[in-house]
Amino acid sequence: MSSPLVLSQTVEYALRATLYIARQGTRVVRIPEIAAEVHAPSRYLSKILGQLAREGILESTRGRTGGFRLGPTQRRVTLASIVAVFGESERRRCLLGHGVCGRNPGCAVHDKWAPIAQSSSDFFAHTTLADLVSSIPHP
């Protein structure tokens, strides 16, 4: 799986919100609180989190006390899994615009760029929410 070094705003919000929710343990967290913490528009964030819930990454509850939370097994979700929900798991593109990275043998930047891009992909593929939650200081 490949992950871009530059993430869309949607994916950034999804990652920040999911990490914030994961830090709350099993507590249900409401959209206004999450939006304030991750500096995202509430309506947009609601759609993003709804999509993550439909994919099984988050659990959602409705009603007056509704919101989102992460189940115990969901803490092992990788960052790549979150990125993939938003269709950004496509193959790396060549920095010079020659299609898929690595398919143009004469690419001037491939030898220097490939290890960086691979390192990024490895980070997303092998880093879980639990890995990051344990390393983020709590307020």
Image (tube, grey):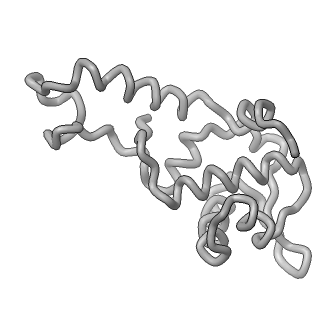
- Residue ID at (20%, 26%): 109
Relative to 26, residue 134 above or below: above
Q: Nearer the viewer, residue 85 or 92?
A: 92
The picture places residue 13, in percent across and down from the top left corner, at: 59, 58
Judged left or right of residue 16, residue 135 is: right
Q: Quadrant of residue 47?
A: bottom right
Judged left or right of residue 53, residue 109 is: left
Relative to 47, residue 84 above or below: above
- Quadrant for the N terminus, please: top left
Q: Nearer the viewer, residue 115 or 86?
A: 115
Judged left or right of residue 3, residue 34 is: right
- Residue ID at (45%, 24%): 119
Q: Residue furthest front?
A: 139
Q: Quadrant of residue 8?
A: bottom left
Q: Nearer the viewer, residue 99 or 42?
A: 42
The picture places residue 102, in percent across and down from the top left corner, at: 21, 27
